[in-house]
Amino acid sequence: MPRPIVIAPSILSADFASLGAEVRAIEDAGADWVHYDVMDGHFVPNLTIGPGVAAAIRPHVKTKIDTHLMISPADPYLDEFAEAGCDTITIHAEAGPHLHRSLQHIRKLGKRAGVAINPGTPPDVVDYVLNLVDLILVMTVNPGFGGQAFIPETVAKIEAIRAKVGHRDIDIEVDGGITPETAPLVVAAGANALVAGSFVFQGGPSAYAANIAAIRRAAQAAAKR
Ligand SMILES: O=C(CO)[C@H](O)[C@H](O)COP(=O)(O)O
Ligand SMILES: [Fe+2]
């Protein structure tokens, strides 16, 4: 069975002064997961939020917190993100020397384990951890900021990852520059989980449902082909 299409709005583009209300609004508008971006000013050139804010929004989230750790090292913080109530914890393959050990640790914490790969990273880094991952995040921009343009060369890499994953129970997620125009490209290449920040949050809460629906429609049309 193919994995269902998932739309995961990135709260990087939400109003940080009202995160609880923003999370409730995107879920009411049809979000499948809440994508939670953690940046350390070291692995990526930007700083965002940590496990404390994840714990604060947890009571407002009915779906899943899909955590994208853009931090190095990640290992010292995995327990804290698990305790905060994150459901999926995704680490970057480039962020540490012990990808296998880090993924084992996330699984031991009882969480879904994800591995993310930057646009310049070859797909082969996932070859020997396929049995340890629930999600592979193919970055479609260089991580660090919302609102960047989709990098078209990443489409071939999504295809390569889909060929490796086959019908395993693993989500293939994309993140960066996802809109109704780019969604069909990534879904046709094999992605099923689509993160979108600036597109979903544009226009404020009254526009969230239409924005999510526009991406979902474009993705589902491509999935049927
Ligand atoms: O991980 C990220 C950036 O590193 C964000 O999830 C991503 O940027 C989403 O934002 P947008 O849809 O605006 O590109
Ligand atoms: Fe992200």
Image (cartoon, rainbow, N blue to C red):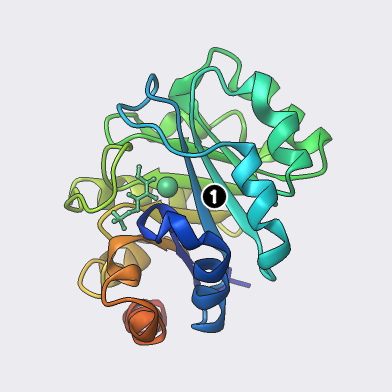
Q: In the rendering, at what x and y percent does residue 218 appear?
A: 31, 81
Query: Outermost residue toward the front?
Result: 17
For residue 73, above or below residue 20: above
Q: How many marks?
A: 1
Of residues 48 and 95, the one drawn nearer to the viewer in this rendering: 48
Q: Quadrant of residue 121?
A: top left
Under tag 1, what secondary structure? helix
Label 1, on which residue?
Answer: 165
Mark 1 surroundings within 10 Å by alpha-carbon count, few (fewer than 14), some (14 through 19), many (20 or more): some
Residue in the image at 39% along x and 22% along y: 43
For residue 93, above or below residue 62: above
Q: In the rendering, at what x and y percent does residue 194 appear?
A: 42, 63
Query: On the picture, is 100 further left or further right than 200?
Result: right
For residue 45, above or below residue 113: above
Query: On the picture, is 17 further left or further right than 75?
Result: left
Q: In the rendering, at what x and y percent does residue 63 appear?
A: 66, 68
Of residues 167 and 183, the one drawn nearer to the viewer in this rendering: 183
Q: Quadrant of residue 204?
A: bottom left
Residue 135 visible in this rendered orientation of the protein: yes
Of residues 30 and 114, the one drawn nearer to the viewer in this rendering: 30
Q: Is mark 1 within 8 Å of ligand 2?
A: no
Q: In the rendering, at what x and y percent does residue 21 appear?
A: 54, 70
The quadrant in which the N terminus is found is bottom right
Residue 164 visible in this rendered orientation of the protein: no
For residue 6, above or below residue 134: below
Residue in the image at 35% along x and 34% along y: 118
Residue in the image at 59% along x and 28% along y: 128
Give amino acid for label 1: Val
Query: On the picture, is 16 further left or further right than 211?
Result: right
The quadrant in which the C terminus is found is bottom left
Residue in the image at 52% along x and 81% along y: 30
